[in-house]
Every structure is written in structure tokens, then in C-alpha cells.
């Protein structure tokens, strides 16, 4: 049972890490292509 829990935690960490990378890439993409939009939003 503990082994299964460990796998679940590792999976969750991997998914969260992937999501963070995607968000970072999306922010870079938006910032590069729409700098005026980012400035207006003050993000």
C-alpha cells in the first residue's frame, strides 16, 4: 500500500511539474508576442 501511495505522489509531482513548465512557456509566449497586453494587465 505504501508503495502505491509513493507512486501516486510521484505521479502527482510529475504532472504538477509539467503543468508549471507549460504555464511558464505560455507566459513567455504571450509576453513575447503580446508585450502591450501584458503591460496593460500588470501581470
Image (cartoon, rainbow, N blue to C red):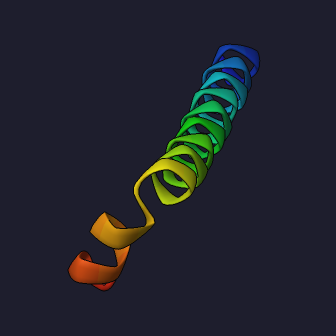
Q: Residue at x 62, y 42 (%)?
A: 25
Name the foreground residue: 5 vs 36. Answer: 36
> Residue 34 placed where, x, y %?
40, 56
Say if 42 sits above or below 28 in the image.
below
Report the side of 13 relative to 29 (left or right): right
Q: Position of residue 16 (x, y in %)?
A: 57, 38
Q: Residue 30: x and y, percent?
A: 45, 50
Q: Is residue 24 above or below residue 37?
A: above
Which picture quadrant has residue 38? bottom left
Nearest the viewer among 29 and 14 is 29
- Decide which of 41, 11 is in the foreground and name it: 41
The residue drawn where x is 49% and y is 48% is: 33
> Is 32 left, or right, of 37 in this rendering?
right
What residue lies at 44% left-to-right and 66% top-to-bottom? Answer: 35
- Quadrant in which the N terminus is drawn: top right
In the rendered view of the protein, which quadrant contains the C terminus?
bottom left
- Residue 35 horizontal side relative to residue 13, left or right: left
Image check: 9 left or right of 36?
right
> Which of the pair 29/24 is nearer the observer?
29
Q: In the rendered picture of this protein, how many numbered marks are placed on residues? A: 0
Query: From what the image shows, is residue 13 above or below residue 34?
Result: above
Residue reaching furthest left?
41
Q: Quadrant of residue 29?
A: top right
The residue drawn where x is 30% and y is 85% is 42
- Compared to residue 25, the image places residue 3 above or below, namely above
Amino acid at each position: 500500500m505504501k508503495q502505491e501511495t509513493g507512486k501516486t505522489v510521484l505521479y502527482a509531482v510529475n504532472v504538477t511539474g509539467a503543468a508549471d513548465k507549460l504555464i511558464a512557456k505560455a507566459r513567455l509566449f504571450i509576453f513575447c508576442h503580446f508585450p502591450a497586453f501584458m503591460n496593460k494587465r500588470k501581470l
